[in-house]
Image: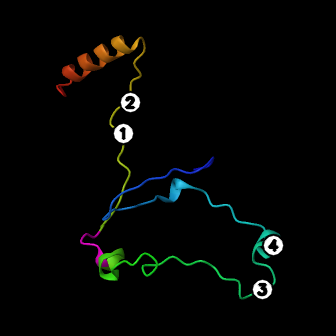
Amino acid sequence: MEDGFFLIEAPTPVVLTAIKELNTPRYPHMKRIFETYGPNPERKIDRWDSNLFKLDETKIGLKGSPTRVKATFTPSRKFEGEMLEGSLMNMTRNLVVRLKERQIL
């Protein structure tokens, strides 16, 4: 997140996805890159892989997935949202009435 982080814990198996609109990457200036890595070409860069987490490679990634995604899309809006106003009791009452009118409840 822009102002911090959001921690999510989930038992495995779990599916994690991210969309390209999630964040706009900011590329560092060359000066910062050199300050970070310095003159030492042997500087170790951490690499996370299945061995680090002791995962069975046949059960992760594209090869381990039992599903295949043919396409993704963002559904179009069918109607505009409606903001309810008033006290909590009145908003709750109005919400229930509207849901019953639409035969959702």
Looking at the rendered structure, the secondary structure element under dot 4 is helix
> What amino acid is found at the position of numbered circle 2 in the picture?
Glu
Quarter of image, res 9: bottom left
Query: For residue 33, which numbered disc appears in the image?
Result: none
Residue segment shown in magenta: 64-68
Q: Residues within 10 Å of mark 1 (few under 14, many from 20)?
A: few
Quarter of image, res 32: bottom right
Query: For residue 35, which numbered disc appears in the image?
Result: 4
Mark 4 or mark 3, which has the lower sequence index? 4
- State how far apart marks 4 and 1 are (Cα): 48 Å
- State how far apart marks 2 and 3 are (Cα): 57 Å
Q: Which residue is mark 3?
A: 40
Q: Residue at (35%, 81%) from the top-left corner?
A: 57
Q: Residue at (68%, 61%) from the top-left corner?
A: 26
> What amino acid is found at the position of numbered circle 3 in the picture?
Asn
Image location (x, y in percent) of residue 78:
32, 36
Tag 4 near tag 3, CB within 8 Å: no
Q: Which is more foreground, mark 4 or mark 2?
A: 4
What quarter of the picture does the C terminus occupy?
top left
Q: Which residue is mark 2?
A: 80
Q: Which residue is mark 1?
A: 77
Q: From the viewer's perspective, is 101 left or right of 41?
A: left
> What amino acid is found at the position of numbered circle 1 in the picture?
Arg
Q: Which is more foreground, mark 2 or mark 3?
A: 3
Q: Residue at (39%, 78%) from the top-left corner?
A: 54
Looking at the rendered structure, the secondary structure element under dot 3 is loop
> What amino acid is found at the position of numbered circle 4 in the picture?
Glu
Tell me if residue 93 is in the magenta stretch: no
Looking at the rendered structure, the secondary structure element under dot 1 is loop
- State how far apart marks 4 and 3 are (Cα): 11 Å
Q: Residues within 10 Å of mark 2 (few under 14, many from 20)?
A: few
